[in-house]
Amino acid sequence: MTDLATDYLDIDALLTEQELDLRAQVRRFVDDRIRPNISSWYEDAVFPQDLVKEMGSLGLLGMHLTGYDCGGRSAVEYGIAAMELEAGDSGIRTFVSVQGSLAMSAISKFGSEAQKQQWLPGMAAGELIGCFGLTEPTAGSDPAGMVTRAVREKSGWVLNGAKRWIGLASIADVAIIWAKTDDGIRGFLVPTDTPGFSAIPISGKMSMRASIQCDITLENVHLPESAALPGVVGLRGPFSCLNEARYGILWGAMGAARDAYQTVLAYAQERTQFDKPIASFQLTQQKLVDMVLEIQKGTLVALQTGRLKDAGRLRPEQISFGKLNNVRQAIEICRTARTILGGNGITIEYSPLRHANNLESVRTYEGTDEVHTLIMGRAITGIPSFS
C-alpha cells in the first residue's frame, strides 16, 4: 500500500523498474556520501571535488548522452538522478548539470569527431571537468549583448572578454566559451591552461556555498582553428544546451522541496509543545498538506516533461513551464518548512533554509522567473513582449 506521507498519488507506479532501480542507486549515494558531510561543506564553502570520479563511475556525468562512454540514459532517468542529487544539495546537482547538460552537451551536439573523442570519455568518467562560459558581467538574461569577442588570425583565433557566474571554471580542464565573431556567436573549446585564461572563484556567497562559481578573464587567448565548435553559429547553440540544464532543474528543485518536507515531517512528529507533538496542530498540518500538494504536482510536471522529451515532442516553452513553476514552489516549500522548525530552522543542522538559500540561485540561473514568464506569455498569446 502506498505511503501517503511520501507518495500521496502513488507516482512511483508511473515509473519503470529500471527507473526505480536508478533512483535507489543515486539515493544510496546521496545518503552515504552527501548527507553526512553537506553541512560542513556548506558552512565552509567547500565543493567536494573528490566526489567527481565517484559520480563518473555511477554514470551520472553526461548520462543522457550516447556514445563516447556516456550513459545513454533516458531523459526521465536523468531527471530522477537530478532530483535525488538535489535532495542532497543543489550544489552537487549543479555540478552534474554544468558538466553534463552544458559542457558535454555542447561538445556532443556541436563538436567535431576529434573534439568528442578528445574530451567526452574523460568527462564522462569524471577525469576531466568542463565549464560553460556564456553569462557576462553585463550580459545575463540578454546573452546577445555579450562583449567577449573572437577574432580570426592566420593560425586560428584570439579571444578577449570576460564571463561571470561560471560554474566549475577554477577547477575545469576545458571551458566552452561563447564569443562574438564576424560570422555570429560561436563556441570555442578553451583548455584552461591556455595563456591568458584565468578563473577566480566568487566569494561571499549566501547561496550555493558547496559549489563553485567564477569570474573568467580572457586576455589575448590564442587558439587554433580546431578549437571552434564547427556545428553551430548563433545563439541556437548555447540555448539548446541551456534547455538541457533547465530540464534537469525542474526535477532537481522537487528533490530539494521533498527533502525539506521530509525533514520537518519527522521533526513535527517528534517535537512536543503544550504536551503534544506539533504535528497535531491544525496550522502545522495545513503547512504539511500544502507542501505535499505542490511536491506531488511538481513531480508530475517533471515526469510528464520527461516523457515528452523521451518521445521527441518536448518544446522549449514547455521546459519554461516546469522551471518556472517547480523552482518557485520549491522555494516556498522550503521557507514554510523552516517555520515548522522554529528557531532551530536557522541552524545548519536542518536542511530547509540551506535548500531555500540554494534555490535563490537556481531561481536566477538558466533563466529568471521573468524570462520564463515572458517565454510562456509569447507561447500562449503568440505575441513576443521582448526582442
Image (tube, rainbow, N blue to C red):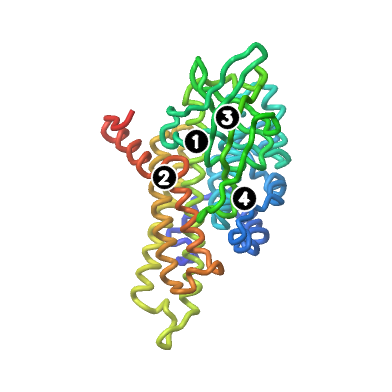
Where, by quadrant of the figure, is residue 37 drawn? bottom right
Residue that appears at 63% across and 57% down: 30
Q: Position of residue 130 (x, y in %)?
A: 64, 37
Residue underneath mark 4: 22
Tell me the quadrant of the picture where the C terminus can be found.
top left
Residue 312 visible, this orientation? yes
Query: Label 4 amino acid?
Result: Leu
Of labels 2 and 4, the one closer to you: 2
Sequence-earlier tag: 2 or 3? 3
Where, by quadrant of the figure, is residue 283 drawn? bottom left
Query: Label 3 amino acid?
Result: Ile
Q: Secondary structure at mark 4?
A: helix
Of labels 4 and 3, the one closer to you: 3
Characterize the local packing of mark 3: few (<14), some (14-19) or many (20 or more) Cα atoms within 10 angstroms. Answer: many
Q: Position of residue 224 (x, y in %)?
A: 67, 19
> For the residues marked 2 and 1, what is the alpha-carbon distance in whole angstroms?
22 Å
Residue underneath mark 1: 135
> For the residues marked 3 and 1, what is the alpha-carbon distance in whole angstroms?
10 Å
Between 212 and 372, which is closer to the camera in this rendering?
212
Characterize the local packing of mark 1: few (<14), some (14-19) or many (20 or more) Cα atoms within 10 angstroms. Answer: many
Residue underneath mark 3: 177
Q: Secondary structure at mark 1?
A: loop
Query: Label 1 amino acid?
Result: Thr
